[in-house]
Amino acid sequence: MWKYIKHYLHFALLAAAFMVGEVLMDLIQPQLMSRIVDEGVLGIGRGGSADLSLIGNLGLRMTGLVLFGGLCGSLNNVFVHLSGQNIGNEMRKDCFGRIMAFSFPQMDQFGAGSLITRVTNDITQVQTFFFLFFRGVIRTSMLMFGSIFFMFRLSRRFGLIVLCAFPLITGVMAVCLIHANPLFKKLQEQLDKINTILQEDVSGIRIIKACVREAYEKQRFGAVNSGLVQTQSHILFIFALMNPLMNALMYGVAAVLLLTGSREVHFGSATPGSIMAAITYTTQLLNGILMLVMLFQNISRGLASWRRIKEILVSEPLLKDGDFRRESDVKGEIRFKDVSFAYPGNSRLILKHINFTIHPGETVAFMGATGCGKSTLVHLIPRFYDVTEGEVLVDGINVKKYRLKDLRSKVSIALQKSELFGGSIEENISWGAPEAGPDAIRRAAETAQADTFISELADSWQTVVAERGMSLSGGQRQRISIARALVKDAEILIFDDSTSALDLRTEARLYRALKETYPNSTKIFVAQRIASARRADRIVVLESGRIAACGTHEELMASSRAYRAIWDSQMGEEERDG
């Protein structure tokens, strides 16, 4: 945490200094009031005659101290907020930067809902922690110890009475905090669940309505929210019990002080003004303790949130950058060398001993049953995951030796699930290559067969896309995603079932345009339809994580039973014979 504090320590120290000034003004007031009562009003030491000039002088002094204390309090608020907001800002940026560097398994481990909670609510709790620490802790500790110090100055007996109550007060606080602390982490975890459900339901609202599952989702959300309310109620109940206990103890101390003070006044060892000052200090002490109770509650929650944020900040990316390597003369060659792969945390191999080479400029299609490992295989090329065994080589170099930025600059990928961002269509396409000019954007859109429908929109290229692209059809979103991949002009183009929403005629035009416009790029297709794959130079059939067959459409029709089974299921026996 010091990493963030040290940059804004000057603000924090100024805040602490001004808080000291504010509390000192509060602690001096009771002594001045004691003199006004004893010397100014009752005339003790003056034969019982009031001293109006003393009252006026001390009154003006108290007014000045109040104004100065108020100024110190205002400046304390300014500097404590400057430090807290800046510290939170730095934390939020660092957390987001670390999340952007996470690998897919790390994203799955934390979960989107939990990451959102940590970057928003948890960092807000930490900012509150800083605010309370530099304002509340200094104020309460000075009020408490300052009140006791001045009580001893008034009367040693008064100070001892207050000190005797301290063990009881500390014991009550300790018991309550021991029971409350574990609940703060649980509270934040329940917020994670709420954010996860909210994110899922908002993004999937169409399917929820289509399946008439609104009532079920309300019930699911309500159950998690009830758990959150129950935990919050448990925490509030603990502190609700603590507050009256602390009040009872402190008011008991005040009663003992009044009783003892009345006797000392009777015997002449104390004055009414000193009794008033003692009661005021006791009230300040009580307020300080009550504030401390609330502080511990918020600080405990802030520390629990800090531990959750720290989990992000100390998490190192699982995929480490390799050393920078000079690019070879070969462009777009991919080789799988005895590659086996299992997802992290799962011992079952998805891919088993894959040996295969894709030559520069070649078009290769991967086919197979759902779950056979097609998408997993192509995701190893840009190193979304690391292989379990073997090597993946791009241009003769193991992908692990590349810097991730260098490797992924060679590869452009379009996924089946089209992710679009807020902004215009032109901005979404250029997102793949921010430096691309209008001509490059138009060229990519024409190849992706997107230019026709874009030009027919009311605002054409400047049409603003709704959240997640929901204002466009599935096929339109896919074509924009393909254009975004193409505008990057990478050596390796991967289309992971990214044409599934296109009709066969549009898809055929896309393949022809790709062949004409990007003849030197290596093109890899993950396909479910034979009509999509048959135009490739080679088709690779995967079966249970292994290469079952490889060849052209005609070769596979003659030699591969698995490929013919796919053909029969899609095209029909009669069409095959014809």
Image (spheres, rainbow, N blue to C red):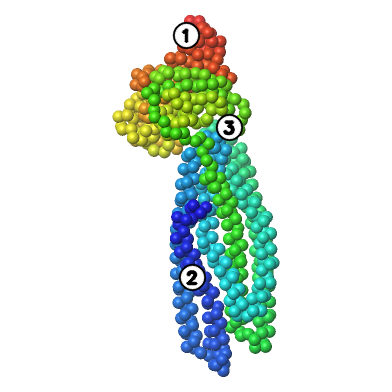
Q: Secondary structure at mark 2?
A: helix
Q: Secondary structure at mark 3?
A: loop
Residue 372 x/y as whole percent: 56, 21
Frontmost residue, 452 versus 116: 116
Query: First in sequence: mark 1 or mark 3?
Result: 3
Amino acid of disc 3: Pro
Q: How many marks?
A: 3
Instruction: State the CA–CA distance, disc 2 to disc 1.
Output: 88 Å
Residue 485, visible in the rendered structure: no
Q: Residue at x 35, y 31 (%)?
A: 457
Q: Residue at x 50, y 74 (%)?
A: 25
**Tag nearer the camera, 1 or 3:** 3
In percent of the image, x 57 and y 38: which residue is there?
A: 109
Q: Which residue is mark 3?
A: 344
Q: Amino acid at mark 1?
A: Glu
Q: Residues within 10 Å of mark 3 (few under 14, many from 20)?
A: few
Which residue is identified by label 1? 554
Q: How crowded is the residue under tag 1: few (<14 C-alpha within 10 Å), some, or many (20+)? A: few
User: Which element is circle 1 on?
Assistant: helix
Marks 3 and 1: in contact by CB < 8 Å? Answer: no
Determine the residue located farthest toward the bottom in the rendered image.
47
Label number found at residue 21 = 2
- Please state which amino acid type lies under the numbered disc 2: Gly
Mark-to-mark CA distance, 3 and 2: 57 Å
Is 273 placed left or right of 516 in the picture? right
